[in-house]
Image: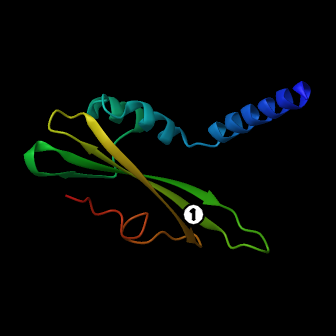
């Protein structure tokens, strides 16, 4: 019985480690950066944003887009996966919140406006 419990615990541990390995680097960074990272620190880590929008009271929204090409085969058409991250900074340039949109675009062409349909326009 003890051996089965140890094996079950080991299995759960390996599963959790495996899930962490598949988390995008941007998600890992933003989870740790929220609440204290400045715009300058985020720019150093993620590069320049795709879109910047100033909001009322000095806050701002930055939008990042990260693309990944997926090659097709006889069962699935090639396409482009797009991760869109929307980061909200307060008036002191601190990252306060963020969210992520994920979209797949079949074929090799991206839509003219926005990576994730309907998500690129900053709320505010």
In the visual, does 91 lie left or right of 36? left
From the viewer's perspective, is residue 20 above or below residue 105? above
User: Looking at the figure, which quarter contains the C terminus?
Assistant: bottom left
In the rendered view, would you say 101 is above or below 111? above
The residue to which callout 1 is attached is 80
- Relative to 103, is 14 on the left or the right? right
Of 49 and 85, nearer the camera is 85
State the image coordinates of residue 64 (x, y, percent, origin top left): 38, 50
Q: Position of residue 8 (x, y in %)?
A: 82, 34
Q: Which residue reaches farthest left?
A: 57
Residue at the spot 36% in from the left edge and 31% down from the top edge: 44
Is 53 rendered above or below residue 76? above
User: Which residue is nearer to you in this view: 103 or 98?
Assistant: 98
Say what secondary structure mark 1 lies in: strand
Residue 27 relative to residue 16: left or right: left
The residue positioned 83% from the left and 30% from the top of the image is 5
Q: Is residue 91 left or right of residue 31?
A: left
């Amino acid at each position: 019985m003890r051996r089965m419990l140890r094996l079950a615990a080991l299995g759960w541990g390996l599963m959790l480690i495996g899930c962490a390995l598949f988390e995008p680097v941007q998600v890992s960074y933003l989870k740790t950066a929220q609440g204290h990272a400045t715009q300058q620190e985020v720019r150093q880590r993620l590069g320049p944003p795709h879109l910047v929008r100033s909001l009322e009271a000095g806050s701002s929204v930055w939008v990042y887009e990260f693309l990944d090409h997926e090659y097709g085969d006889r069962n699935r058409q090639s396409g482009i996966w797009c991760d869109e991250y929307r980061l909200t900074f307060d008036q002191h340039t601190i990252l306060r919140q963020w969210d992520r949109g994920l979209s797949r675009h079949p074929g090799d062409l991206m839509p003219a406006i926005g990576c994730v349909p309907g998500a690129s326009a900053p709320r505010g």
